Image: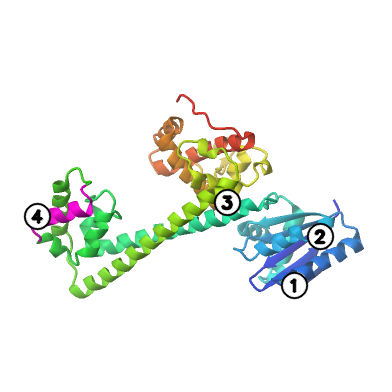
């Protein structure tokens, strides 16, 4: 097909643009501002080129660069003048573009060259399907589910840093299972209200028992045993010099506030997501263990299921596919997950799989089978395989708009 290929290197201020003819020759290149005025100039130049050279179609490509390309893509999709032409818009994986660029020898690194590489990548083909859906409900939902994803990542990192400082203050509380949840109300109360481990070590047992029971709201089955374990942990922990101990207490106090703020933020996201998903009919919530948040995370990234030919293409899009290593008659049985794929979709599928295997016997059985197959990374591997199995179900339910009916097993 006689197509005009347009590579766009996006930045916060400017967009470098490269027009490429079907034979690979340069048509033109220029830079416009990344704003409405610049987008209109780009549109005018496209319309002019299409009219003068009778191109049959125009194919746009830009790298995935945070939010800086979102406005431009929306403009290109909806601009009235461009709607007269057969057009496609692709957002390319940055790693994919870099590997394509590596096939050229000694290309410099600048915006104009990057725009050329994107255009040439489009010309060669072998790129993903268009990723933008017509239904803005998916994008609205995606804004919430992706923001929640980052909040969860931040919470995980903050908790890990917290545990490092907890070891400094109260080494045995960090390493031993005194409380079932180190971030539970009682555990955090101990950390906040006792400035040193000596206070716990020297405290009257009955007073400490009363403290533990009150902070645990009398929910411990055996508060005496918990209190004994806490006091024993305190007596066996390292002691810090006072100056260092004071600074550690300050850090822990700030981190606890940060953890609570992030948890509040995630709860707010969950409520907003639960409301937003109501306007998108789906059958995923009929699967035991998949609530509105996980269903939303999956649907927001998949969008219109008809974009995908089969469940394998959904799995590959999510990065839940394995590399092949074969040479001659040898083919490796244990290979790694591919490094490409939509990390948000992969995250929500794996989290959903972890929840489903706790609630659905069929998936619990499958997870346990895979858990026993190897001696290394059992949980991580079994969970990835369970998520891959879940993809097949997700594809069928979305494609047929049917409710999930559990099997006997």
User: In terms of sequence position, does the residue under pointer 3 or pointer 2 come before the other?
Assistant: 2
Quarter location, residue 323: top right
The answer for how far apart the CA atoms under marks 3 and 2 are is: 29 Å
Find disc 4 in the rendering and name its residue: 205
* Left or right of 118, for residue 274: left
Which residue in the protein does label 3 denote? 342
Residue 99's disc number: none
Mark 3–mark 2 contact, CB under 8 Å?
Answer: no
Q: Are marks 2 and 1 in contact (CB under 8 Å)?
A: no
* Label 4: which secondary element: helix
> How far apart in space, not on screen, are marks 1 and 4 (Cα)?
73 Å
- Of discs 1 and 3, which sits in the foreground? 1
Count neighbours of disc 1 (C-alpha within 10 A) and say few if under 14, some if 14 to 19, many if 20 or more: few
Q: Which residue is mark 1?
A: 37
Question: Can the viewer see residue 263?
Answer: yes
Instruction: Name the residue located 51 percent from the left edge and 58 percent from the top edge.
Output: 147
């Amino acid at each position: 097909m006689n197509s005009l290929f347009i590579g766009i290197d996006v930045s916060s201020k400017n967009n470098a643009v490269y027009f490429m003819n079907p034979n690979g020759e340069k048509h033109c290149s220029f830079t416009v501002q990344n704003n409405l005025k610049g987008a209109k100039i780009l549109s005018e130049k496209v319309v002019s080129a299409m009219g003068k050279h009778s191109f049959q179609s125009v194919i746009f490509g830009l790298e995935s660069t945070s939010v800086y390309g979102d406005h431009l893509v929306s403009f290109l999709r909806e601009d009235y003048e461009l709607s007269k032409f057969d057009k496609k818009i692709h957002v390319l994986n940055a790693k994919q573009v870099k590997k394509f660029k590596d096939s050229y020898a000694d290309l410099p690194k600048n915006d104009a060259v990057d725009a050329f590489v994107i255009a040439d990548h489009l010309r060669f083909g072998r790129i993903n399907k268009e990723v933008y859906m017509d239904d803005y409900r998916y994008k609205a939902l995606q804004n919430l589910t992706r923001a929640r994803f980052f909040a969860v990542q931040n919470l995980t990192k903050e908790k890990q840093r917290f545990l490092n400082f907890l070891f400094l203050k109260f080494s045995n509380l960090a390493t031993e299972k005194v409380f079932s949840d180190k971030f539970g109300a009682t555990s955090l109360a101990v950390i906040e209200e006792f400035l040193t481990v000596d206070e716990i070590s020297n405290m009257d047992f009955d007073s400490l028992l009363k403290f533990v029971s009150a902070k645990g709201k009398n929910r411990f089955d055996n508060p005496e045993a918990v209190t004994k374990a806490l006091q024993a942990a305190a007596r066996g922990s390292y002691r810090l010099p006072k100056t260092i101990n004071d600074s550690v207490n300050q850090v822990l106090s700030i981190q606890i506030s940060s953890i609570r703020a992030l948890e509040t933020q995630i709860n707010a996201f969950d409520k907003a997501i639960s409301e937003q998903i109501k306007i998108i009919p789906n059958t995923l919530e009929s699967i035991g263990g998949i609530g509105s948040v996980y269903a939303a995370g999956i649907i927001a990234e998949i969008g219109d299921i008809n974009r995908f030919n089969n469940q394998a293409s959904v799995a590959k899009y999510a990065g839940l596919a394995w590399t092949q290593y074969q040479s001659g008659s040898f083919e490796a049985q244990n290979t790694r997950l591919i490094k490409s794929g939509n990390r948000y979709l992969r995250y929500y599928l794996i989290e959903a799989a972890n929840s489903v295997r706790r609630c659905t016997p069929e998936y619990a059985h499958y997870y346990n089978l895979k858990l026993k197959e190897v001696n290394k990374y059992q949980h991580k591997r079994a969970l990835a395989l369970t998520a891959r199995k879940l993809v097949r179900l997700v594809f069928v339910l979305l494609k047929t708009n049917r409710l999930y009916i559990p099997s006997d097993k």
